Image (tube, grey):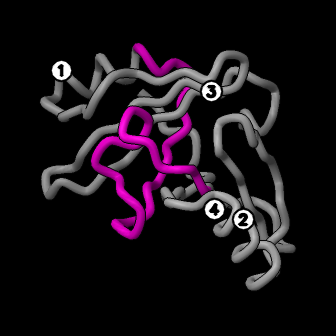
Amino acid sequence: MEIKKMELAWISVQDFARAKQFFTETLGLEIGHEVAAHGWLELKTATAGFYLGVGQYSEAANGPITPGSNAVLTLTVDDLLATKAELEAKKVVFVGEILEVPGHVKMALFQDPDGNHFQLVQRLDDRVKN
């Protein structure tokens, strides 16, 4: 197993439009990527390399990651299924099912021993694979 890099931390929000306005207009962050149909926005600073993800909260997609709870660090891997199996063999606890946005990304949420949430991510598009 190899964690390739950490490129994104994300938060869930109650009001996607309000959050988008806050982060872009109030804080001046730039939109790096947006999938409005899924209530998803990735924001960047002038210095590239790390993104803040902002997602419209839904119980199905976010489960226990409610608005205001914390940011979730994502760990990018080449093969989500193989990495998940390897971590499960090491008794890592996963939360919910693997989620997929077809053509974009596969995701699996897991917890560390203290209950902090992290997410494995496998990119399915050619945007920022390394």
Q: Is residue 41 left or right of residue 67?
A: right
Residue at which label 3 appears:
105
In this picture, is 125 found above or below 117?
Answer: above
Q: Earlier in the sequence, mark 3 or mark 1?
A: 1
In this picture, is 90 found above or below 40?
Answer: above
> Distance from label 3 to label 4 (Cα)?
16 Å
> Distance from label 3 to label 1 (Cα)?
23 Å
Residue at which label 4 appears:
52
Q: Position of residue 75 (x, y in %)?
A: 49, 43
Secondary element type, mark 1: helix
Residue 9 counted in the magenta span: no
Residue 89's disc is 1
Residue type (three-letter) at the residue carrying disc 3: Val
Q: Position of residue 92 (x, y in %)?
A: 19, 34
Identify the residue at the far bottom of this view: 26
Q: Is residue 37 left or right of residue 31?
A: left
| Closer to viewer: mark 3 or mark 1 | 3
Q: Residues within 10 Å of mark 2 (few under 14, many from 20)?
A: many
Instruction: Tell me where the magenta segment starts and ends, as one range.
Output: 54-81
Q: Position of residue 18 (x, y in %)?
A: 67, 68
Q: Is residue 65 left or right of residue 104?
A: left
> Distance from label 4 to label 1 (Cα)?
31 Å
Q: Position of residue 79 (x, y in %)?
A: 52, 18
Q: Is residue 39 left or right of residue 11?
A: right
> Distance from label 2 to label 3 (Cα)?
21 Å
| Closer to viewer: mark 2 or mark 4 | 2
Identify the image quadrant of residue 51. Answer: bottom right
| Closer to viewer: mark 2 or mark 1 | 2
Residue type (three-letter) at the residue carrying disc 4: Leu
In this picture, is 96 found above or below 36?
Answer: above
Secondary element type, mark 3: strand
Residue 20's disc is 2
